[in-house]
Image (tube, rainbow, N blue to C red):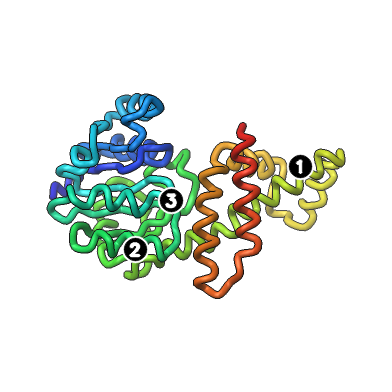
Amino acid sequence: MAEEKPTFCFIGFGEAGQAIAAGLREAGAGRIAAWDILFAKPEGDRLKAAGSAIGVDCASSALEAVGGADVIVSAVTAASSVEAARSVKPHLAGRPYFFDINSVSPGRKQETAKLLGDSARYVDAAVLGPIHPARHRTPMLLAGADAAAIATMLGALGMRVTVGSGEVGAAAAIKMVRSVMIKGIEALTFECFLAAARAGVVDEVAASLKNNFPGLDWKILIPYNLERMARHGERRAAEMEEVVATLPELGVEPLMAAATVKRQREMGRIGM
């Protein structure tokens, strides 16, 4: 492995993949390739144009993309995470790292690790903040037997990674549980201030909340939460479905999480 300039492959080249790839390119990473199932469709032209602007080689197949990569970053939709690993497994050589940043349940991460087996060194990665503007420097928590080894490599490229448990799924568990609060507050903001707007009491409600939560600036928080839902609501709804799958494993009935799925998806469909 070329330690000074590790090479990367992104499976899934949406917003997160593009942002992290751009940051890694500027940080001095070696070759960066990408493969997205949309590349073969007309809507993939936008993704390929973004890759060209960054300096990413947009491959014509998963086989071409993963060839020679030291690190494979899986950044697909939550529902596609296992299938993404299955699609690249036959093409893996040299046991590359498989860096799974997808927002899925611990069980889904464990299933993916088992699927890959000895074909790759699987790393459970949880993204713990907005991908913009930090890009590849967005804080991430890593878990798995190979987490410490890859952390050294990624840290040299400026990535803010913290090694947690050696057990796959531990990072995902933290991501899933914290999403109950983060995405739930977003959904509550939408519901609360939609009602406040219709009642003509937005300023009064915001001022009242300031009394209860003096550390929060609601004039900033309200538009921020609504913007995130409008821009990413459908993806966040899919992530919350993974939360709904996770909580029963911990003996918690996902009443609020299930409602958050509905609100996030509703706002995502409304859009900006």
* Disc with the residue nearer the chain's start (1 vs 3): 3
Q: Which residue is mark 1?
A: 194
Question: Which amino acid, mark 3?
Answer: Ala
Instruction: Classify mark 2: residues with Cα within 10 Å, few (<14), some (14-19) or many (20+).
Output: some
Q: Which residue is mark 3?
A: 79
Looking at the rendered structure, the secondary structure element under dot 1 is helix
Residue 111, labelled with which disc? 2
Q: CA distance from mark 2 to mark 1?
A: 40 Å
Looking at the rendered structure, the secondary structure element under dot 2 is helix
Instruction: Classify mark 3: residues with Cα within 10 Å, few (<14), some (14-19) or many (20+).
Output: some
Question: Which amino acid, mark 1?
Answer: Leu
x, y percent for residue 226: 65, 41
- State which mark lies toward you, 1 or 3: 3
Q: In the rendered view, does 233 fall on the left or right side of 26? A: right
Residue at position x 63%, y 50% in the image? 262
Which quadrant of the rendered structure holds the C terminus? top right
Residue 230 sits in quarter: top right
Q: In the rendered view, does 263 fall on the left or right side of 7? A: right
x, y percent for residue 98: 27, 54
Question: Which amino acid, mark 2?
Answer: Glu
Q: In the rendered view, does 197 fall on the left or right side of 246? A: right
* Disc with the residue nearer the chain's start (2 vs 1): 2
